[in-house]
Amino acid sequence: MVKINGKEIQELGRKILHILMGITALLLIIYEILTPLIIFILFAISVMLSLFSLYYKLPIVNFFLNNFERDRDKHQLPGKGFLFAAAGTLLALRLFERDIALASIIILIFADPISYLVGKYFGKTQSFLDRRKNVEGNIAGFLISSLLALFFVSPVLAIAGSLIAMLFESLIIEIQRIQLDDNLIIPLTAGTTMFLIRTFLM
């Protein structure tokens, strides 16, 4: 049985919140309730709230920061994960065709959280690309995000987008230690991969 401490419980909460908020946002985008303009406005408001929360305790914002934010981000850029997820989603919607954008967003929603959750509780083999993760988690994240991306794009695009996004995240961010957020990297890498394959190979 896996024992978890307070920080791991917080990280588990972060991953679950990431999935729930992502699914909600995706559905609102599909039904055109959440438009790029609204996402931009929410992003701008969130940036201001993030900056204010460095100096003032804002009740609702403070609750989420205390319960779901990593300690290192609280004093640098509060709400960093949400901000970069919003930016990644907005860029995907503006840069790519709608089906590719939606597939990129669903890969963002599920790839990393599923990789973490499966690796944490069922993983046995440490990944040589990312020491924080396990091979079993990486495979699960890839498979589930690929399957869900099939709702929007062809199997070739779904598999390629998920695979390259996960590999790029590990190779570029982890090995070379470039300080880029995976909530921004994953949708842009997945979308670019699918766009290039569709443009030049299909």
Image (tube, rainbow, N blue to C red):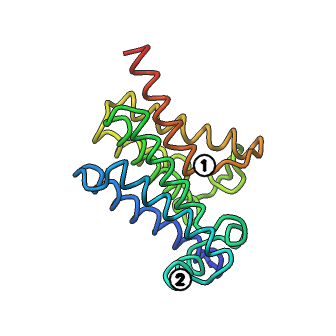
In the depicted structure, whether residue 77 falls above or below residue 195: below
Earlier in the chain: of badge 2 and badge 1, it is 2
Residue 11 sits in which quadrant?
Answer: bottom right
Q: Position of residue 169 (x, y in %)?
A: 62, 43
Element marked by disc 1: helix
Image quadrant for the C terminus? top left
2 or 1: mark nearer the eye? 2
In the image, taking residue 155 as reference, residue 166 lies left or right, namely right
The dot on residue 155 is none
Query: Observer-nearest residue: 89 or 7?
Result: 89
Q: Residue furthest right?
A: 176
Q: CA distance from mark 2 to mark 1?
A: 34 Å
In the depicted structure, whether residue 135 falls above or below residue 121: above
Q: Position of residue 17 (x, y in %)?
A: 46, 69
Q: Residues within 10 Å of mark 2 (few under 14, many from 20)?
A: few
Q: Residue at x 72, y 46 (%)?
A: 174
| Three-letter amino acid code at the position of disc 2 | Phe
| Three-letter amino acid code at the position of disc 1 | Val
Q: Residue at x 42, y 62 (%)?
A: 19
Query: Observer-nearest residue: 177 or 34?
Result: 34
Query: Observer-nearest residue: 13 or 196?
Result: 196
Q: Position of residue 97 (x, y in %)?
A: 35, 32
Element marked by disc 2: helix
The dot on residue 63 is 2
Counting labels gives 2
Q: Residues within 10 Å of mark 1 (few under 14, many from 20)?
A: many
In the image, taking residue 180 as reference, residue 82 lies left or right, namely left
Q: Residue at x 42, y 41 (%)?
A: 104
The dot on residue 135 is 1
Q: Position of residue 148 (x, y in %)?
A: 34, 46
Residue 79 sits in which quadrant?
Answer: bottom right
